[in-house]
Amino acid sequence: MCTFLKMLFKNKKYTHKTEEIDTMKKFLIVGLGNIGEKYTNTRHNIGFKILDHLAKTEDLQFETQKLGDLTTYRFKGRTFILLKPSTYMNLSGKSILYWLTKEKIPLENLLVITDDLNLPFGSIRLKTKGSDGGHNGLKDTQDKLNTTKYNRFRFGISDAFSTGRQIDYVLGEWTDEEKSKLPERLDKAIALIKSFGTAGINNTMNTFNGK
């Protein structure tokens, strides 16, 4: 009987360890944006656009679930859950917190993709913490997660707008010149996401920031 209990205990420890390893190999990749056709090609929806590009490249299909559209991408032993919140930008954190909790994904395995007015068009910057920078999607994420220490992938949309036209610019569509350059930038964004899950945050920052 004693031997049996020891074996049972060892099996439980082994099972727990396996679950822990699996959890650490699971990532939540969130593209911020607004739902609705009128927002599809706007600068503010670059988070959605990047995930849509990844899904198209890998022949994945998004499904509408609670608080967002989701699909799963598996790559080199990692599981990437791709999430496009359906809460609109200002309530993005609600969806992020729900799926982090439901999928039992550790905070360090979260990556939030957003537009950034302070970066030149197409520039990418990966950070592990920081302020919301006036971005409502990041502000709500910070409020819901109760921390500023989460990974965010900022995609530059530049600040080529005149005084008082920021909202129109952010919610405006890409110029023809920007559209011609987007495919290469989207491919670079996908490479960053894969690196985040396989090479880690620090190596990925060193490889991609400013590129």
Image (cartoon, helix red, strand yellow):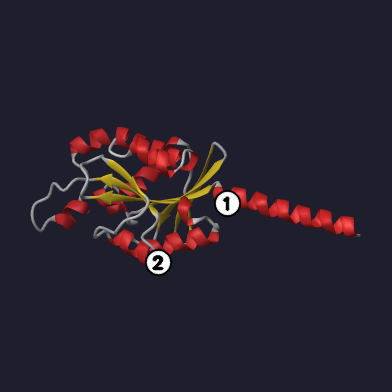
Asked if one can make out residue 87 in the rendered structure from this viewpoint, the answer is no
Residue placed most toward the observer, 160 or 132: 132
Q: Is residue 27 left or right of residue 120?
A: right
- Residue 188 on image: x %, y %: 35, 35
Q: Is residue 1 left or right of residue 180?
A: right
Q: CA distance from mark 1 to mark 2?
A: 22 Å
Name the residue located 32 percent from the left edge and 59 percent from the top edge. 138
Residue annotated with mark 1: 23
Image: 177 above or below 64: above
Residue annotated with mark 2: 146
Residue placed most toward the observer, 121 or 16: 16
- Residue 153 on image: x %, y %: 34, 47
- Residue 13 on image: x %, y %: 72, 54
- Residue 38 on image: x %, y %: 27, 53
Q: Earlier in the sequence, mark 1 or mark 2?
A: 1
- Say which amino acid is labelled 2: Asn
Name the residue located 48 percent from the left edge and 63 percent from the top edge. 98
Say what secondary structure mark 2 lies in.
loop
Mark 1 neighbour density, 10 Å: few (under 14) some (14–19) many (20 or more): some
Residue placed most toward the observer, 13 or 169: 13
